Amino acid sequence: MIKKVLLLSDASAVHTKRWQKAYEMIGWDVSVASFEKSLYEFKKFEKIEPKFSGRFKYAGSYLRLKEIVNKVKPDLILPHFIPNYGLLSFFEKIRKKIPYVLTIWGSDLLLFPLKNRLKKLIAKIIIDGASGVVVDAKFMKEILVENFDIRENKIIVIPFGVERKWREKGRNKKIGNEKPGIITYRKMEPLYNQEIIIKALKKFSDQERRGFYVDWVGAGSLSSKFKEMIYNEGLFDIVNYNGYVTEEELQSLLLKNQIYLSSSFSDGTSVSLIEAMSFGLFPVVSDIKGNREWIVDGINGFLFDPRSFKELHFKLKKALKDKDLRARACLLNKKIVEEKANWEDNILTFKNFVLKNL
């Protein structure tokens, strides 16, 4: 029987807080340990201070993890991300025979193992050592089966999903006659490719820009660069830069806007996409495998080549003009989320999967 679990994950990420709440919802006593500074309130939190930097940062922090495990005495370890927290969990399984269920976020499977053969071998060893593996998209399960020779019954596809309170707020969203707004909220990092958004917005004429606005939410290492670009390209009249916002502020923005925009080069199931769909927004998102599992181009959103700002401009222009398409997609997207991304249902499925595989 599982009573105590140790969640190893990035404490600065909202996904970690969401999973912590979910584990508690199914009756587990949850302790969280992280290399990152916590931006959220956790009932039980342990900071992992690395003794080394660079390539030995994670392996060199194993002694600190041993201290935490000896203190918490978990029945199960729940690492999120393969090469850091997954690696530490693998070491602890060897030492104390504590099982771990690995949750993969995206780039740790889609990018990390591709860097060289050694990193692919490390990823393979960590994945093999897990009692179960959680991914949030079907194509990621296919990668594990085909490229890492992992048994299908060891893998479960669980989209992060949307909590009931989000879905309930989004139910009242309708497409009206107000000026349509575009919202984008991804980290300002190279992976999310936001420079293409600036280039696409620049292609709109002065007359066209009077017909819409953009709410830009988020921050990251490229924040200063993009804010400067927005100003230099003369887009400050239509772009409202919000930085980080609270959950309540984000929900208000989703209620106000009509189009969701993401230009990421890589994603599993994007939580921000699912959240936007739960509020009936019309997605204009990059044409990658993770997005294709949720969006049919021209039906409930638009897909575009993330390397073509001209195609992005064209798709945004179509989305802004076609109010009827946005209205139909509004109803369809809320229905899709209710059926496929109901977080409360998904987390119970996760619990049953874990109990079956231990």
Image (spheres, rainbow, N blue to C red):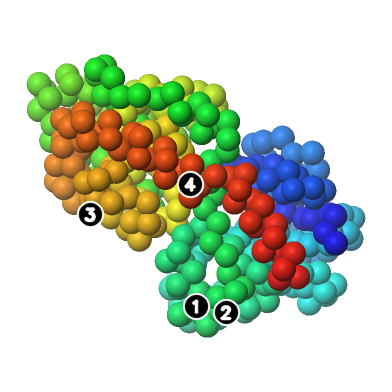
In this view, the residue in front, 292 or 220, is 292
Depicted 121 relative to depicted 24: above or below: below
Q: CA distance from mark 2 to mark 3?
A: 33 Å
Q: CA distance from mark 4 to mark 2?
A: 27 Å
Identified by mark 1, the residue type is: Val
Picture coordinates of residue 190, whole percent (x, y): 37, 51
Q: Residue at x 52, y 29 (%)?
A: 168
Asked which secondary structure carries label 1, the reply is: helix
**Which circle marks residue 145 in the picture?**
1
**Which circle marks residue 151 in the picture?**
2
In this view, the residue in front, 54 or 205, is 205
Picture coordinates of residue 303, whole percent (x, y): 25, 50
Picture coordinates of residue 175, whole percent (x, y): 30, 24
Asked which secondary structure carries label 4, the reply is: helix
Which is nearer the N-term, disc 2 or disc 3?
2
**Which circle marks residue 44 in the picture?**
none
**Which circle marks residue 305 in the picture?**
3
Identified by mark 3, the residue type is: Asp
Q: Is residue 238 visible?
A: no
**Which circle marks residue 339 in the picture?**
4
